[in-house]
């Protein structure tokens, strides 16, 4: 009842695509039964969470916020969501997102935009973007509807919405969380992670989500450390790198101020602050917007009107049914939104025989250079501190007609994605409009602990 009231009260946020309060209740009852029977309780026992609607959930519609997957009800459960249920968590519902996780404001969803629970101090009724693509997740956690939520991050989709809504979110090292059962966007970049109110909650939830999975060929066959148990904000002996190339034009002065404060907090926690260089940073965004659409164009080829969800069968004036190609075309024309079509077109273009060398191949080389930048930086520091985004949240509708302005939001997030590194956003301060600003911590491969510890010192 409390959940239903919360959802009704927060209905204006449009954070949920499907509500499943009965699932959260079942989990709570299981916990009661386990407790009564003296059985061990999992680390997420009874915790009501939201599930980004990109994770396949058995018997519960899974849409990726698209029309083309409407009506698709998986007969299997994603590994990450199964891990969470095994740890005792319960599902409040499937959370809204940008369609196929493509976007930075949750405005590309087929089910309408999500509204951030935040308002500008003197901004009247202006609705703000919750960030994207995990905008339902960030809004639900920030509005206290869900204790925590899953997110996925291909080029910032956990960190940017966390920053926009004043919560924490961590994208682990690529391979930590299984991609099995997660609707694929760009497979070499996609990673799941937790979004929650505190660094500690993220540590607990990531521990429950992560782990080797033979069903994902890129899954890391490494033990999952107990990040929560080792959490410490004593940073003596650790070096924090400040990448000079992240001082970019167009960055809000208040973001730069939060960065300065972040340095002080980490220094107060015992860390040594060092200047570092990541020389290829400025090429990361263009490389990302070649590689991610290229992979998306391949991944999205499976939505053909035969295997999943929507099927459009055009009939001509004489009532004659269409051929297979017509069905593909009609299904995709009706089923994919504009941003998804834009990505597919860019992706097929950069992969085409005539342009492959000029675009895709170049982008892959840049990706290697970016990864190398970070490898060299680790000789000088243990963790990197940078802003999460160049600005605070913006009004809904502000950037919908300008894809490039929207893509620029990801400028600080994509380098860590291209390099597969663990990266987290933690709330730093409120700006003059009373809106949250986030700071980003990027760590060495497999060193989620270093990221979480520095996050704890800032939180
Ligand atoms: N905003 C980025 C994009 O649109 C990142 C999305 C994501 O991480 N899923 O591609």
Image (cartoon, grey):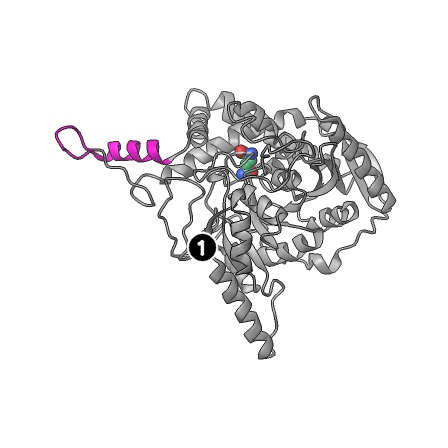
Instruction: Compare residues 50 and 238 and report the one nearer the observer.
Output: 50
Q: Residue at x 41, y 32 (%)?
A: 337
Relative vertical location of residue 322 with respect to residue 59 in this rendering, above or below = above
Q: Residue at x 40, y 51 (%)?
A: 61
- From the top left corner, tell me how far across and down residue 347 is, in percent: 45, 28
Instruction: Compare residues 160 and 282 and report the one nearer the observer.
Output: 160
Q: Residue at x 71, y 30 (%)?
A: 278
**Residue at the left extreme of this rendering:** 318
- Number of marks drawn: 1
Q: Which residue is mark 1?
A: 57
Confirm whether the magenta stretch covers residue 317.
Answer: yes
- From the top left corner, tell me how far across and down residue 144 is, in percent: 62, 51
Instruction: Compare residues 165 and 369 and report the one nearer the observer.
Output: 165
- From the top left corner, tell me how far across and down residue 266 is, in percent: 82, 43
Q: What's the magenta region? A: 315-335
- Direction from residue 299 to residue 323 in the image, left or right: left
**Residue at the bottom extreme of this rendering:** 37
Residue 380 appearing in the image: no
Q: Residues within 10 Å of mark 1 (few under 14, many from 20)?
A: many
- From the top left corner, tell me how far across and down residue 351 is, in percent: 44, 27
Confirm whether the magenta stretch covers residue 217.
Answer: no
Classify mark 1 as within 8 Å of ligand 1 or not, answering yes or no: no
């Amino acid at each position: 009842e409390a959940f239903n009231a919360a959802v009704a009260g927060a209905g204006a946020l449009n954070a949920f695509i499907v509500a499943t309060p009965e699932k959260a209740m079942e989990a709570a009852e299981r916990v009661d039964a386990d407790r009564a029977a003296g059985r061990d309780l999992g680390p997420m026992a009874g915790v009501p969470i939201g599930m980004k609607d990109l994770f396949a959930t058995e018997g519960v519609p899974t849409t990726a916020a698209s029309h083309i997957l409407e009506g698709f009800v998986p007969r299997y459960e994603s590994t990450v969501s199964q891990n969470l249920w095994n740890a005792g968590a319960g599902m409040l519902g499937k959370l809204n997102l940008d369609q196929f996780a493509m976007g930075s404001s949750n405005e590309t969803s087929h089910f309408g935009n999500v509204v951030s629970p935040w308002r500008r101090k003197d901004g009247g009724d202006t609705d703000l973007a919750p960030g994207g693509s995990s905008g339902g997740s960030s809004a639900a956690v920030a509005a206290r509807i869900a204790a925590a939520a899953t997110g996925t991050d291909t080029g910032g989709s956990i960190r940017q919405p966390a920053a926009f809504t004043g919560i924490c979110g961590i994208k682990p090292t690529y391979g930590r969380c299984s991609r099995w059962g997660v609707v694929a966007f760009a497979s070499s970049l996609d990673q799941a992670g937790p979004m929650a109110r505190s660094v500690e909650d993220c540590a607990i939830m990531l521990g429950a989500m992560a782990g080797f999975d033979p069903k994902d060929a890129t899954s890391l066959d490494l033990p999952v450390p107990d990040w929560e148990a080792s959490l410490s904000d004593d940073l003596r002996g650790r070096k924090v790198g400040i990448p000079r190339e992240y001082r970019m034009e167009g960055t809000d002065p208040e973001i730069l101020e939060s960065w300065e404060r972040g340095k002080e907090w980490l220094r107060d926690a015992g860390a040594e602050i060092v200047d570092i260089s990541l020389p290829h940073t400025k090429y990361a965004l263009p490389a990302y917007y070649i590689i991610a659409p290229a992979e998306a164009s391949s991944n999205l080829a499976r939505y053909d009107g035969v295997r999943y969800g929507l099927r459009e069968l055009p009939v001509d004036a004489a009532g004659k049914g269409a051929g297979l190609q017509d069905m593909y075309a009609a299904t995709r024309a009706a089923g994919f939104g504009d941003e998804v079509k834009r990505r597919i077109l860019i992706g097929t273009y950069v992969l085409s025989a005539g342009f492959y060398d000029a675009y895709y191949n170049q982008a892959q080389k840049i990706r290697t250079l970016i990864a190398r930048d970070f490898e060299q930086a680790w000789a000088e520091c243990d963790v990197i501190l940078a802003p999460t985004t160049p600005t605070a949240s913006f009004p809904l509708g502000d950037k919908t007609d300008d894809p490039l302005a929207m893509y620029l939001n990801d400028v600080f997030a994509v380098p860590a994605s291209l390099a597969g590194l663990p990266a987290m956003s933690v709330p730093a301060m409120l700006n003059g409009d009373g809106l949250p600003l986030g700071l980003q911590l990027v760590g060495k491969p497999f060193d989620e602990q270093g990221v979480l510890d520095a996050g704890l010192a800032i939180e």
